[in-house]
Image (cartoon, helix red, strand yellow):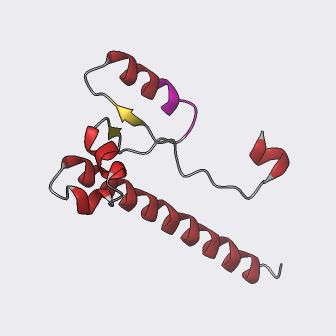
Amino acid sequence: MVIYFENPDLNILGCLFSLYKDNLPAHAIIREQTELQIPVFKTNIPYRTQVYEAHLVKQPLAKFISASDIAVFYSQLTDEILDSIGDIIDKQKYINEEEVMNGN
């Protein structure tokens, strides 16, 4: 509704699942149901105590524990976001080129 009425140019990149637990069937079911409705990022951010510990000592997660898998997950998410933004920019360029060619 927000896109339709308030901001028709809004692009939703995807839904992010954080505090995700692969071993909980409910999480997998919720993810599957969400994927039927809206775009979902491939990367899930799992629950890790290191996130809270880094926050407590006021350090970026990548610096606090760079060897942790959680830092890898956030890096993967960043790559997904950047790829999605690039796709949107490419699509907009194509639309603009079409409009120019059609004299609009």
Which stretch appears magenta?
33-38
The furthest residue to the top: 25
Based on the picture, tell me whether residue 37 belongs to the magenta stretch.
yes
Q: Measuring 46% from the left and 42% from the top, which residue is drawn there?
A: 16
Quadrant assignment for the N terminus: top right
Based on the picture, tell me whether residue 98 belongs to the magenta stretch.
no
Q: Measuring 25% from the left and 63% from the top, which residue is drawn there?
A: 63
Q: Measuring 70% from the left and 76% from the top, which residue is drawn there?
A: 96
The quarter holding residue 59 reads bottom left
Q: Compared to 23, does 97 lie above or below? A: below
The quarter holding residue 48 reads top left
Q: Where does residue 17 sit, x and y in percent of width and height?
A: 43, 37
The quarter holding residue 102 reads bottom right
Q: Where does residue 84 sit, x and y in percent of width and height?
A: 48, 60
Quadrant assignment for the C terminus: bottom right
Q: Measuring 35% from the left and 40% from the top, which residue is drawn there?
A: 44
Total marks shown come to 0
Q: Where does residue 99 sit, x and y in percent of width and height?
A: 75, 76
Q: Compared to 45, does 30 lie above or below? A: above
